[in-house]
Amino acid sequence: MTGQQVLQVSLDTTADVQVRLSLLTDQGAGWATVWSVVVGSDEIGLPTLVSGDPIDDGRFRLPAVVATGLPPHLSDIARVTWLQLREPFGYLGMVPWEQLLAPVVPGPVLRLPSIDLGARVPSDDLQVALLAVAPDPDRQGAAAEYLHGRRIDAGSRLRSWTQSRPDAEARDQPAPPRSLRPDEHRLTADGVGLLVDAILRGSPRRTTVHVVTTPRLFHELRARWRDRTWPVHLHPPPATGAATGSDWFSQVRAAMGGEQADVVHLVCGASVSGAKVRLAMADVPDGTGQDGSRFVSLSTLRRFLDAVGAWSVHLTAAPGDLAVPALRLAAARLVEERPGPVVLTDLATDLDAAEVRAAYRFLCRTEPTVPPTLSHTLVGCEPHRVRGGEGLAGGPHTSLVEAARPTGAIASIIHEEDTPAWVAAAQRFIEQRQLELARLRRDAPVGSGTPEGRHTAEGIEEAIDALSEVVNSWAADTERAP
């Protein structure tokens, strides 16, 4: 045995909606299912339909048959238990699996994508874009938001996602706090400072943090950080009336000044309605006097991440945010839909940001290592980041390391300290298409490949190759330029 084990979770809808859990281990001669059980969705607390209202994390539980039946079959030599949600997994992505499994699974639990493109190696200079724009539950006014191109009143729903907190504490502290108060119920300057401090202390690379946030938090942070000399750039929000038609992602791109953002760290909310999950952000100040939240689809988020060249995304829920299950579903979807590490943390359960620190320390290394045990944090990543994780190849996981590895001029430029955003964005776009092509080929039923289907796949592959050649040519010209 190699000590590799994967816990797969999937929906079984042949009769009533049920959940199947299966433990797969590498027996040396191949993978085998050593334990499996089917439980009712109600035994886990899985909702049947979510229509925008918040879901209580306390509803989820681990059935006794899993808590008692799984441990005897776990490997004694496994460094990691990989958790894989098998498509289509519906609302299974909302379940706090790491927290539920912590008492029965020793060691770290990591999310395993079904397909990965190999570990990205960060350069010595790590650029982190921190976008702290969680919806404020205390905002008043004509709450309006755009959803599917329609304007709807959503003030009461916005406030139902979060809990208001008592008066803010004194704002004249000179340094970031060591931890948040347990009764903190909104995103404050303390929380943003705590995250920045955790990023800098956790990252093993030379790190610069670019902070984009709401006007209220900007002014508080500017007062606190005025006399500090550290690698943090606090970018001012747009002047009132100057950002009409803009969005937060545009502000981040402007803040990066044409350079790549290796990691995008979002502090925001989320909403689930039917099969759709969206991020919820505070409105960009535009001088209209409207207060609410702007919803962002995951496809829009993926395009933004590609545009800034991000190889990793970190989502954080603000203290007291009731939308954590929705944000967890967004993270679970990103693990499958986009190459690279995905992290979800919650400041309500990580008061000193220790798990944020640990996640950066693990994911930003250049060499494989043993991951930390994080009981409240979702971490999805490629097996190549874990020491010994390469043994997963050929099992319930497909790795396209060689196919996706940048070559030529791109390979040299993308690892430089000041990587142009366009180079990184082009590489991320190519990687996204490679992932989609691999998924297309994987999901085609065996023996059902039609000439049209084969030609489609071949056309996509040829387009990827042609685009790679063009980008390599541009990158080579950039290298030769004085």
Image (cartoon, rainbow, N blue to C red):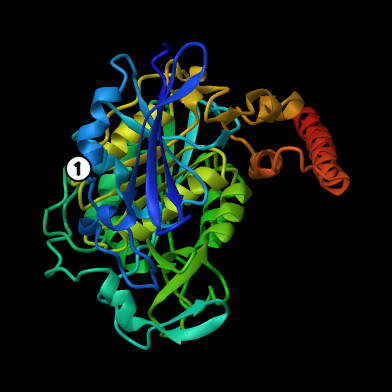
Q: State whether residue 2 is above or below residue 445.
A: above
Q: Nearer the viewer, residue 439 or 66?
A: 66
Q: Quadrant of residue 289?
A: bottom left
State the image coordinates of residue 424 (x, y, percent, origin top left): 64, 39
State the image coordinates of residue 275 (x, y, percent, origin top left): 49, 64
Q: Quadrant of residue 464?
A: top right
> Residue type at mark 1?
Ala
- Left or right: where 74 falls relative to 264: left
Mark 1, other Cα within 10 Å: few <14 / some 14–19 / many ≥20: few
- Left or right: where 245 falls relative to 2: right
Q: State whether residue 324 is above or below residue 345.
A: below
What residue is at 38 percent from the left and 15 percent from the top? 3
What residue is at 30 percent from the left and 29 percent from the top? 108
Q: Nearer the viewer, residue 213 or 482?
A: 213
- Left or right: where 37 falls relative to 166: right
Q: Nearer the viewer, residue 45 or 325?
A: 45
State the image coordinates of residue 54 (x, y, percent, origin top left): 30, 68
- Asked if residue 307 shows in the view, the reply is yes
State the image coordinates of residue 166 (x, y, percent, origin top left): 11, 69
Q: State whether residue 300 is above or below residue 68.
A: below
What residue is at 58 percent from the left and 60 percent from the top? 300
Label 1 SS: helix
Q: Nearer the viewer, residue 259 or 131?
A: 131
> Mark 1 highlights which residue?
64
Quadrant housing the N terminus: top left
